[in-house]
Image: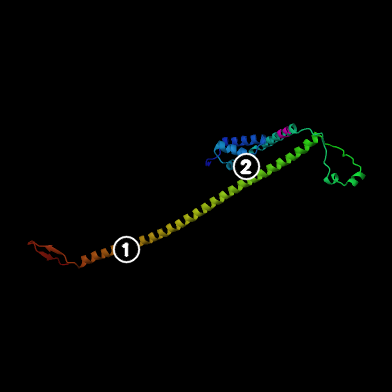
Amino acid sequence: MKVRQDAWSEEDDLLLAETVLRHIREGSTQLKAFDEVGDALNRTSAACGFRWNAVVRDKYDDAIKLAKKHRKDRKRQLAYQSKPVAAYSVPQQPESQLFKPAEVMESVPVTPPAPSVTTPAAVTEENEITLKDVIKFLQKMSGNGYQESLLKQENEALKLKNNELTEKVKNLEAHLNKLQEEHQIIEEDYQSIIQIMNRARRMALLEEETEEHHSPKFRMDKNGNLEKIAK
């Protein structure tokens, strides 16, 4: 499966434009052009079609008109060369007239229908207009349907990406709230520990002062005996 993540370069856009214009001039379809470019650039046909319709196409309006005119003239010439010359066309009679009863047929004079003359120019012009209308209609339907399909695919991809980002934001918000709660608990524990340490420090100082105040002091005399020092 062809998957490309890099951006389109100017050379890629130029190759896409030249290929599409060549297919238009030759009477081919844009879908075949997208397939050819996708094989050359290792991209999907849908990606090439989306790039053409969204970015590249607007830059080549004049070239597209010239390519379509060239295709129109080419098809007109081929159609004129391939059409046989038909001098006459005799319409067939309805079946009801061919199988009338004998007595009715005898009473009605049979007159052969006059041949209708159809010139080659009229046949060619009529068939050419019909062919143009069909090609124009098919191209319009194919282009609109393909572009609509690409837009739907792009819309679905954007929806999926939006859902993923929304879910990610929710997870990050939940994680942030949890961290804030843990931080609040740690802060409260820290303040409690500070209070306990300050209280213990004050109690230790108080006990030292009390011992110094109540405990008797002694000293050693010349004979090595301890004697109490009077306060």
* Rendered image: mark on residue 55: none
Query: Is residue 221 placed above or below 145 in the rendered structure?
Result: below
Earlier in the chain: of badge 2 and badge 1, it is: 2
For the C terminus, the quadrant is bottom left
Task: Give x and y (percent) for residue 25.
Answer: 67, 34
At label 1, which amino acid type do we have?
Ile
Q: Could you tell me which secondary element the residue under label 1 belongs to?
A: helix
Q: Which residues are magenta?
A: 74-78
Quick one: label 2, few (<14), some, or many (20+) residues within 10 Å?
A: few
Kindly identify which residue carries mark 1. 196
Task: Please name the residue shown 80% across and 36% down the image.
Answer: 122
Going by the image, does 211 lie left or right of 8?
left
Task: Please name the residue shown 58% across and 37% down the image.
Answer: 37
- Name the residue at the bottom extreme: 214
Query: Is residue 175 placed above or below 47 in the rendered structure?
Result: below
- Name the residue at the right extreme: 107
Going by the image, does 154 lie left or right of 138?
left
At label 2, which amino acid type do we have?
Asn
Gap between marks 2 and 1 measured at Cα? 73 Å
Instruction: Inspect the magenta stretch and tell me whether residue 125 lies in it.
Output: no
> Magenta residues: mostly which secondary structure?
helix
Task: Please name the residue shown 66% across and 45% down the image.
Answer: 144
Going by the image, does 134 lie left or right of 168?
right
Query: Is residue 119 placed above or below 177 in the rendered structure?
Result: above
Task: Give x and y (percent) for residue 168.
Answer: 49, 53
Labels 2, 1: front one: 2
Going by the image, does 206 lie left or right of 139?
left
Q: Quadrant of residue 227?
A: bottom left
210 or 38, nearer to the observer: 38
Task: Give x and y (percent) for residue 123.
Answer: 79, 36
Kindly identify which residue carries mark 2. 53
